[in-house]
Image: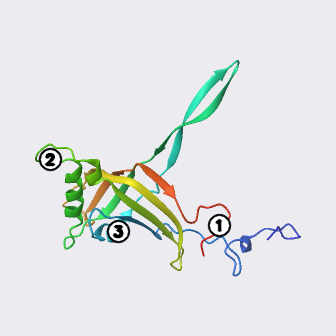
Amino acid sequence: MGLPSDGFMNGDHIAQQEGSYEPQRQSNILLFVQPDESDLMTLSLQSFPIPTFESSILTTEYLNEQRKFAGRATYSDMEVVFKDFVDNAVAQLLWKWRYKVADPETGKIGLARNYKKKGFIWMYSPEGSIVRKYDLFGIWPASINHGEADMSGDDSQKITVNFAIDRVVPRDGFNPGNQIG
């Protein structure tokens, strides 16, 4: 679709009946991480960021200029907020996983092979088809924050977990020229 012949532009170019430009909704995204066989963590999600992938910048000076080169690749950690439920063991599941990282009773640090997991982020279209996927490698709970008590509040309790991530790989939906559908 090109510009109209009269040069007039309006909202009909986006989300028209036979058009495209359907927005990705923030609430149509799921994070899957399973430290055991339970799906409690996915069902308890409230919010999480999509991890960022960046490279440090190396610079080399030459004469009166400098040139930039890609350095080490890094992946951002994810601060994930879970809803805490009384009748589902979300907090217990997270603590059991955290104990594999570092046991506060014994002071022992766990082996990475026992606490690092694989995770997935799936982004859905409004009608439910998967439009984008990310694979998360080496994800583990670096910290857990159970929030605060507020006797005057009426909000439900939240658990915030900072997940460390080794690597994030975009999958379906990111291949140039390919569309899922």
Q: Which residue is mark 3?
A: 42
Q: Position of residue 12 (x, y in %)?
A: 73, 74
Closer to the camera in the image, 89 or 70: 70
Q: Earlier in the sequence, mark 2 or mark 1?
A: 2
Q: CA distance from mark 3 to mark 1?
A: 28 Å
92 sits left or right of 38 in the view: left
Neighbours of disc 3 within 10 Å: few (<14), some (14-19), many (20+): some
**Marks 2 and 3: in contact by CB < 8 Å?**
no
165 sits left or right of 17 in the view: left
Q: Quadrant of the N terminus?
A: bottom right
- Location of residue 161 by image quarter: bottom left
Neighbours of disc 2 within 10 Å: few (<14), some (14-19), many (20+): few
In this picture the colour scheme is rainbow
Q: Mark 3 vs mark 1: give the one in front.
A: 1
Name the element at disc 1.
loop
Q: Which residue is mark 1?
A: 178
Q: Position of residue 147 (x, y in %)?
A: 25, 55
Q: Which residue is mark 2?
A: 104
Closer to the camera in the image, 151 or 135: 135
Q: CA distance from mark 3 to mark 2?
A: 26 Å
